[in-house]
Image: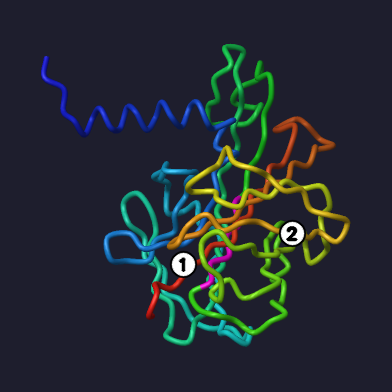
Amino acid sequence: MKIDARDGLRHMALALAALCCGASSAHGVWVAQRAGELAVVLGEGALDEAYEPRQLRETKAFTATGAPSQVQVSARARNVVVEPAKDAAVLWVALEDGFWSQGRDGKWVSGSRLQVPDARKAGHYMKYGTTLLAPVRLPFAPLGAELEIVPLADPFALRRGQRLAVRVLSKGRPVAGVEVIGDFTGNTAGPRVKTDREGRATVTLGSSGLNVIAASLVRPRGDRSEADEDGLEATLAFVLPRAGH
């Protein structure tokens, strides 16, 4: 039987997803160029997942001074693309990854405890992404998300290998003890830095192009009829300018 190479790649992607998903709780969301368009990316490392456009719950754009801007959102078959206004310097997105449950066999499947009553563990997962398109006025005004990463310096003034101070916030308040990954697309297994009492951490930029910094937070639920926990993932993404640009 002849196997199409594209099928092989799809099977490989699914296998990787099953291994790293802890469900897809480890995945983050950010905006990056895909095939000449700005796309909302759901992924981790080199993995770039398809998703239903309806999962994108909210999209916002802001100017460099923090004023609201405009962004056009277009659904595709397997993802969403965005077209920000010319004055937009920041894009923020919220994507619902939904309920995931770990069955008795250890495998993660989509659904809450209501769909998987014998699950070992179940959670509901949300992804929040802040993407900087251009330098912004500092200090960066928090957006008030359930979880977000804000820069404490201008990342566009830095280069690969240099260090950037960030702050992790939940509804504008600092979150202590959260592990921050400095290179979420290139070295997810690399060093992680814990935030201090003010929610601050300093990471090393791992790419001369797209940089994605990530942090996650798990909150146990009081009512566990549907899930045991709420998993939140936040990213801060930006593309460093090429020399001479």
User: How many other residues sit within 10 Å of disc 2, few (<14), some (14-19) or many (≥20)?
Assistant: many
User: Picture coordinates of residue 186 (x, y %)?
Assistant: 48, 47
Q: Which residues are magenta?
A: 127-132
At horizontal 42% and vertical 48% (from top left) the residue drawn is 52
Identity of the amino acid at label 1?
Answer: Val
**Residue at left offset 74%, top offset 59%:** 168
Q: Quarter holding the N terminus? A: top left
Pinpoint residue 61: horizontal percent, then vertical percent.
Answer: 54, 76
Prevailing secondary structure of the magenta residues? strand
Examine the image and state in which quarter residue 213 appears. Answer: bottom right
Q: Tag count in the figure?
A: 2
Disc 1 is placed on an element classified as strand
Quickly name the residue at label 2.
168
Q: Which mark is residue 230?
A: none
Quadrant where the C terminus sits is bottom left
**Of 75 and 135, the residue lying toward us:** 135
The furthest residue to the top: 105
Residue found at x 56% / y 84%: 63
Tag 2: amino acid: Val
Q: Residue furthest right?
A: 197
| Residue named by callout 1 | 239
Q: Position of residue 93 (x, y in %)?
A: 55, 63
